[in-house]
Image (cartoon, rainbow, N blue to C red):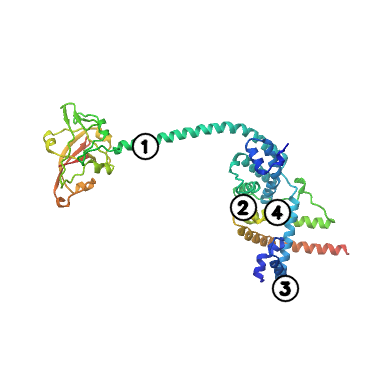
Amino acid sequence: MNTPRDHTDADLFQSMLAGDEDALAALYRDRHRGIYRFALQMCGSPALAEDITQEVFMVLISGGHAFDPTRGSLTAFLLGVARNQVLRRLRREQFYVPVTEDTSANPGSEPATTGGPLDDLSRNETIESVRIAVLSLPERYREVVVLCELQELSYVETAEILGCAVGTVRSRLHRARALLIEKLRPAREEQEASEGIKSARCFA
Amino acid sequence: MNCQRFESLVSDLARQQIMEANVREQAFAHSGECEGCALRLEDERMLTFGLRALATEMKSLEAPERIEEQLLMAFRSRGFTDQSSSSTSRWRYAVVAVAASLLVVGAIAVMRSRLGWPPAANPGGNQIQHSDETAKIKTTESTPGVVDGSGHTTLPDQKRRVRPRQPRRTANSAINETASSASSGKKQFVPAATVNTNHAVTEITTAFMPVGYTTAMNLQEGGQIVRVELPRSTLVAFGMPVNMDRYNQKVKADVFFGTDGIARAIRFVQ
């Protein structure tokens, strides 16, 4: 007997439109993480990311007839809706909450330890610096970084979501990375300087 | 490979994107020779490392379970709503379609009545036509008269009947009858009027044409018809052709004045 998980996205989507609750649950469980992470990486607020995630799937439930499988994937459709929701909320509320250093509020967000405490601290600082730098980018650069670098989508997939040409995605990403390097350069130099001091202490 | 070309490729190099093998080799060879491009590539690699670490860090993040529960609750309630709303919307579309059809039919009927379409055949060519609207004019104390649909004017007091006359066709006929006024979209009014039978025997008249913003309501108030003489150039103002040889001559006209003394309609007499 086929379970909802054995079906393709198109089959699940059609089943959902026909009123199959299990199909909706399967679609949600497969897709919601990517949507939530995208929203969180764009706005930096877990509460706002939750709202946007819920809103995206409500759009799928109520306005799902707008999705055309022949025009693109369901992932691209959902991320496109999420992008519109994020931009609308950001422009309306001019909402930016820098991610706090308290990682205990986000379950499963404990940093993976690969080495000693210094390595962990360095890695955490790097991650935090990068996260803040991404959130500080202008929206049109931030979204290409989030989609291409953090969501690990291809140029083609990103262009489909943003509704622009692949060349536009490449040029925006190039410019966005240059901006990130400029933002992160002072932090990196400071970090390298502090690592030098710590190393000196180790050998003292 | 120069620095400008390398700059366009450095992001893809750091991200290990797919590119042509020879292009990749040239780029790395250039970075080995150019210190500035080498530092640039190093910056890009460090950034890529940081971004991938951030992506890995956030891979485990997900929305809380209550979001799924709320969505399923909304889906269940919407499933019930959709069935009723779809039938309601179907009724709505049907009502709109019927209303639109009635509107179109009504508009066509009004147009046909106003334009007198299909046109009545008249071998005489120039025609005097009386609009059906004239049948509705009320009688007044001073100027009673009712025009029925066939063009007969009935005067209850005088018990006279004035039949519309067929105009004689002449080569120099300067009066274009109702056909031209109909084509110009002018309404044809035949207000209740006192009739001079002496004139009616030998005269050819056009239909009454409204002057200014006259409406049927104005005509129903009653009034008087006054015979005047006007320059032939007046015909031009009413869309009627003028024989330029007789441009400076006078033409007779019957002007209908309302109870307020304002000219409401005019007809030209030959």
Which secondary structure lies at badge 2? helix
Tell me if A99 is positioned left or right of B200 in this view. right
Q: Chain of mark 2?
A: A
* Type of amino acid at the residue the image marks with label 1: Ala
- Using the image, tell me which numbered label, if any, was put on residue B33: 3
Residue lying at 18% horizontally and 26% vertically, measured from the top left: B156
* Type of amino acid at the residue the image marks with label 4: Leu
From this view, report whether residue A152 is shown above or below residue A52: below
Comparing A126 with A150, the one in front is A150
Tell me if B125 is positioned left or right of A66 in this view. left
Q: Chain of mark 4?
A: A
Question: Which is nearer the N-term, disc 4 or disc 2?
Answer: 4
Residue that protrudes farthest toward the left in the picture = B198
User: Residue B181 appears in which quarter of the rendering?
Assistant: top left
Q: CA distance from mark 4 to mark 3?
A: 32 Å
Q: Chain of mark 3?
A: B
User: Residue A190 appears in which quarter of the rendering?
Assistant: bottom right
Q: CA distance from mark 1 to mark 3?
A: 83 Å
- Using the image, tell me which numbered label, if any, was put on residue A160: 2
Which residue does the numbered mark 4 point to in the structure image?
Answer: A150
Which residue does the numbered mark 1 point to in the structure image?
Answer: B107
Which secondary structure lies at badge 1? helix
Which secondary structure lies at badge 4? helix
Mark yes or no: residue B263 visible.
no
Crowding around mark 2 (Cα neighbors within 10 Å: few <14, some 14 to 19, many 20+) is many
Q: Are marks 4 and 3 on the same chain?
A: no
